[in-house]
């Protein structure tokens, strides 16, 4: 009887130990499942918070009257990108749509922005259109550089060269200089815009995302331009063109001139002294027509490596990646026949993708 009782006691102890061990294993398994689930949840949350890496994009911002007459040239240019490193936005007249009937390039279809305004030359509506384009482009978090282009502008180099040139520096490209020789400054702008911060330059700027956000957020300088910067001042003492002063002056007021490269990447020719065409004279740059569209013209523009600013007695030598470079990536103003002629010749064709002609290393 004693042996049987002893056996039962040992058997009971063994069962109890086994049961305890099973409970431990069960609890351990549950804990591991919960831990793995917790880690998986954290990974999912991190994936949502930190989106996958994406190359910075350049936003090309076109200001057009209606259609883009040079869309086929830009179509060839954009085809040079295979990594989704750009986006396109167009400000055209209110109600105008880019569709298969109005553009021959897929890159412009439905790329018009909503809420566009009627733009009149020399009026503040031009800088209003620029602000609308920037606002739309900033909705894409990957747009790190924002380039303003006119509807008569052409690219001078292929996409890869253009992309590397613009993104290789942390600065904006803003043609900006002190405007002391012309009576464009209106004293009524003071004290919001003191004369010491008054700047002039080309409207065809390339902005970093930081500077674009400053332009969009501005609620102080823009209203002053609307009131006091007009092409024909009532007093006939001031002749102010808003788009040639706004961005430059705003960045000067924000003490950000150290963050810009003080030149434009878009070439315009103002040397009209020898022109026999009366339509080419005045406040507007030369318009290149069919007869002007030659390889020599393109070489003349792409050979420029410095810019002289007469009002500041300053010569800007152009650089890229810390080395001497050519100054311009774009040029204007070109008619459609002139641009098409260039596209069909080696002068411009070889600077666009290899699929459209022979390749040329800038």
Image (cartoon, helix red, strand yellow):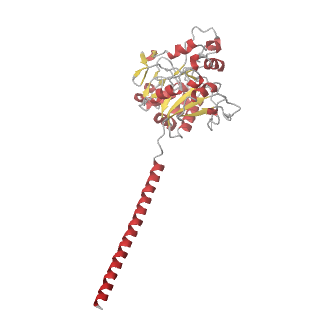
Relative placement, left or right, of 211 versus 241 is left
Residue 189 image offset from top left, x and y in percent: 50, 29
Residue 58 image offset from top left, x and y in percent: 52, 33
Q: Depth check: 4 or 271 in front?
A: 4
Residue 86 image offset from top left, x and y in percent: 54, 33
At horizontal 44% and vertical 19% (from top left) the residue drawn is 325
Q: Depth check: 122 or 102 in front?
A: 102
Relative placement, left or right, of 40 versus 335 is left
At horizontal 64% and vertical 30% (from top left) the residue drawn is 105
User: In which image quadrant can residue 21 be found?
Assistant: bottom left
Relative to 62, does residue 27 appear above or below in the rendering?
below
Relative to 277, does residue 18 appear above or below in the rendering?
below
Residue 219 makes an appearance in the image? no
Residue 1 makes an appearance in the image? yes
Relative placement, left or right, of 234 versus 254 is right
Q: How many numbered marks are there?
A: 0
Relative to 299, does residue 21 appear above or below in the rendering?
below
Q: Depth check: 15 or 102 in front?
A: 15
Relative to 224, does residue 48 appear above or below in the rendering?
below
At horizontal 45% and vertical 47% (from top left) the residue drawn is 50
User: In which image quadrant can residue 352 be found?
Assistant: top right
User: In which image quadrant can residue 118 be found?
Assistant: top right
Q: In which quarter of the image is the N terminus?
A: bottom left
Residue 239 image offset from top left, x and y in percent: 55, 21
Taking the view exactly as shown, the residue that stands out farthest to the bottom is 1
At horizontal 39% and vertical 24% (from top left) the residue drawn is 322
């Amino acid at each position: 009887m004693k042996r049987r009782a002893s056996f039962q006691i040992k058997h009971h102890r063994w069962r109890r130990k086994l049961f305890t061990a099973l409970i431990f294993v069960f609890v351990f398994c549950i804990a591991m499942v919960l831990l793995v689930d917790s880690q998986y949840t954290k990974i999912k949350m991190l994936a949502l918070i930190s989106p996958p890496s994406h190359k910075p994009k350049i936003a090309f911002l076109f200001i057009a009257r209606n259609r883009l007459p040079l869309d086929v040239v830009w179509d060839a240019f954009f085809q040079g990108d295979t990594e989704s490193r750009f986006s396109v936005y167009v400000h055209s007249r209110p109600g105008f749509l880019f569709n298969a009937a109005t553009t021959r390039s897929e890159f412009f279809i439905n790329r018009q922005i909503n809420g566009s305004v009627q733009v009149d030359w020399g009026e503040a509506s031009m800088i209003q259109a620029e602000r609308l384009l920037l606002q739309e482009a900033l909705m894409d978090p990957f747009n790190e550089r924002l380039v303003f282009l006119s509807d008569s502008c052409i690219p001078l180099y292929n996409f890869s060269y253009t992309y590397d040139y613009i993104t290789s520096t942390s600065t904006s490209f803003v043609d900006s200089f002190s405007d002391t020789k012309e009576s464009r400054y209106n004293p009524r702008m003071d004290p919001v815009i003191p004369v010491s911060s008054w700047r002039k330059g080309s409207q065809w700027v390339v902005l970093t995302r930081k500077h674009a956000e400053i332009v969009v957020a501005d609620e102080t300088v823009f209203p002053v331009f609307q009131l006091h910067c007009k092409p024909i001042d009532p007093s006939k003492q001031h002749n102010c063109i808003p788009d040639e002063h706004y961005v430059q002056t705003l960045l000067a007021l924000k003490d950000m001139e150290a963050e810009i490269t003080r030149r434009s990447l878009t070439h315009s020719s103002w040397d009209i002294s020898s022109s026999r065409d009366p339509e080419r004279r005045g406040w507007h740059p030369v318009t290149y027509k069919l007869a002007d569209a030659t390889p020599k013209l393109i070489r003349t523009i792409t050979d420029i490596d410095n810019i002289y600013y007469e009002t500041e007695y300053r010569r800007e030598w152009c650089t890229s990646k810390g080395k001497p470079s050519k100054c311009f990536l774009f040029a204007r103003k070109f008619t459609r026949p002139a641009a098409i002629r260039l596209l069909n010749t080696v002068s411009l064709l070889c600077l666009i993708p290899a699929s459209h002609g022979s390749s040329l290393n800038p």
